[in-house]
Image (tube, grey):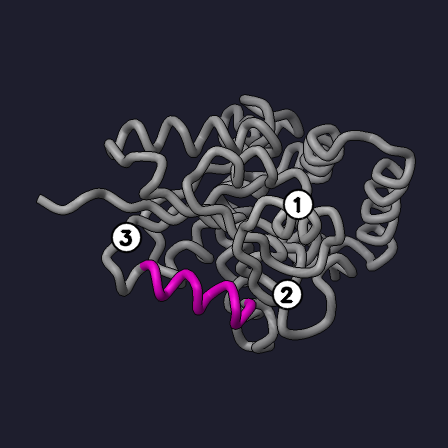
């Protein structure tokens, strides 16, 4: 019996050229009848938190305030429409990231998404990419509606590393048979938890870490920088 090999992928900036959380929020608010300034206000609030040094875990929690009282079924349906819209535009998925993913799939490795985004948004991406599992942030849903809170800490930083270790144990994969791809400093714990870390993109801290430790590097997104969001 062959050894189990697993490849873990961050999503935004690694498999996508854009930040899916913001692209989806923009689409969702428009689809539910909100004027454009509603999205701009929400985006600026989160940007201001980041500029003030608020940890990414907290900005991730704050994002879900925008879904408070939303019907889960509506969010799921709109997310499917949103992703189809992104595919029709043609610039959402990163060539470099998806090529790396396909190489692991062609080698019969398990492929797993590890993301700070949430299931409704990630499900159509995972289905399109034919990945095997998704570990992500879990918004709290009560009586069919989003509460605006999370049911567990967001899938960011050390939580990604924990997900890698748990899933590798479940699949009985040795550390040397695991690979992880990430583009942001918050992905470092996940990269440090695997046998083969791969840095994606041009973040200076990430590239310096990769060069210092002899990690692999692959090129950034193939169009406008994803950090510009929507």
| Labels 3 and 1 touching (C-beta < 8 A) | no
- Name the side, left or right, on which 59 lies relative to 78: right
Q: Identify which residue, 165 or 50, lies in the foreground.
A: 165
Q: Secondary structure at mark 3?
A: loop
Q: Is residue 55 magenta?
A: no
* Residue that label 1 marks: 209
Q: Earlier in the sequence, mark 3 or mark 1?
A: 3
Position of residue 169 relative to residue 225, above or below, is: above
Majority secondary structure of the magenta segment?
helix
Q: Quadrant of residue 82?
A: bottom right
Crowding around mark 3 (Cα neighbors within 10 Å: few <14, some 14 to 19, many 20+) is: some
Residue 95 belongs to the span the image colors magenta: yes
Q: Residue 66: percent from the left, percent from the top?
A: 72, 39
Q: Residue at the far left: name it.
A: 1
Crowding at dot 2, Cα within 10 Å, few <14 / some 14-19 / many 20+, comes out as many
Q: Label 2 belongs to which residue?
A: 220
The magenta-colored residue range is 94-104
Side of 171 where 2 appears, left or right: left
Query: What x and y, as percent, mark residue 53?
Result: 86, 33
Element marked by disc 1: helix
N-term-proximal mark, 3 vs 2: 3
- Residue, x 57% and y 70% (percent of image)? 85
Q: Nearer the viewer, residue 221 or 31?
A: 221
**Mark 3 or mark 1, whichever is nearer to me:** 1
Question: Which of 100 and 209 lies nearest the eye of the viewer?
Answer: 209
Circle 1 residues within 10 Å: few <14, some 14–19, many ≥20: some
Q: Which residue is mark 3?
A: 109
């Amino acid at each position: 019996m062959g050894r189990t090999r697993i490849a873990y992928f961050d999503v935004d900036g690694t498999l996508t050229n854009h930040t899916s959380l913001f692209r989806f929020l923009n689409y969702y608010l428009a689809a539910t009848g909100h004027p454009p300034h509603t999205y701009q206000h929400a985006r600026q609030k989160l940007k201001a938190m980041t500029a003030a040094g608020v940890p990414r875990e907290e900005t991730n929690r704050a994002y879900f305030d925008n879904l408070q009282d939303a019907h889960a079924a509506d969010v799921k349906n709109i997310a499917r429409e949103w992703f189809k819209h992104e595919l029709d535009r043609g610039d959402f998925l990163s060539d470099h990231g998806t090529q790396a993913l396909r190489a692991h799939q062609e080698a019969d490795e398990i492929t797993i998404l590890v993301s700070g985004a949430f299931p409704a948004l990630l499900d159509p991406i995972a289905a399109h990419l034919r990945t095997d599992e998704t570990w992500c942030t879990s918004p709290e849903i009560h009586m069919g509606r989003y509460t605006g809170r999370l049911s567990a800490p967001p899938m960011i930083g050390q939580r990604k590393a924990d997900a890698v270790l748990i899933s590798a144990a479940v699949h009985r994969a040795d550390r040397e048979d695991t690979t992880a791809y990430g583009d942001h400093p918050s992905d470092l714990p996940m990269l440090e938890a695997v046998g083969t870390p791969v840095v994606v993109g041009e973040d200076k801290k990430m590239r310096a870490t990769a060069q210092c430790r002899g990690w692999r590097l692959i090129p950034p997104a193939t169009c406008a920088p994803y950090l510009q969001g929507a």
